[in-house]
Image (cartoon, rainbow, N blue to C red):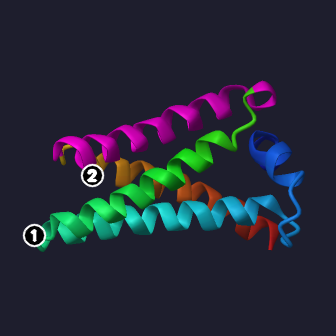
Amino acid sequence: MSNKLNKHYGKSLNEQSLGIEDPKLIIFELLNGLHKKLEITLVNLDKGNANEAKKNAKKAQNIAFALRTALDHSGGGEIAENLDFLYSHIHLATDKFIKHDKKNMLDSALFVSSEILSGWKGLVNKIA
């Protein structure tokens, strides 16, 4: 499975000289940041701090966009398509909240980020 996942992100990240040998670790860090920003968004909402929640939602949205644009759609096949759909869902959920104060999709965005992060944890742990 790691070869398939590497194909989805590999080209765009492998071509960059980022000082990290394995692009899967970069993706893992981005996914971790995405998940944390979504968590912080929901915590701020619970505390009644909508402005801070929107700032963190925007950061999560930017990370989701970066992950989505890093996908290798030509070589990634079905997994790249599925990841694209999931990142799109996160982007939509955060966008609805930021622009229209609609919070109803944020829990599912957090769940999606958690599931993707969990899969990448397994992949990163296999490599280490």
Residue drawn at point x = 41 percent, y = 37 percent: 89
Instruction: Determine the secondary structure under disc 2.
Output: helix
Instruction: Determine the secondary structure under disc 1.
Output: loop
User: Which of marks 2 and 1 precedes in the sequence?
Assistant: 1
Q: Quadrant of residue 18?
A: bottom right
- Is 45 placed left or right of 11 in the picture? left
Amino acid on which disc 2 is placed: Asp
Q: Nearer the viewer, residue 80 or 37?
A: 37
Residue drawn at point x = 45 percent, y = 63 percent: 35
Amino acid on which disc 1 is placed: Gly
Which region shows up in magenta? 74-102
- Is 71 placed left or right of 127 in the picture? left
Residue drawn at point x = 18 percent, y = 48 percent: 103
Q: Nearer the viewer, residue 75 or 121?
A: 75
Q: Residue 22 has which mark?
A: none
The location of residue 101, given as percent across then percent down, is 16, 47
Main SS of the magenta part reads: helix
Q: Residue 107 has which mark?
A: 2
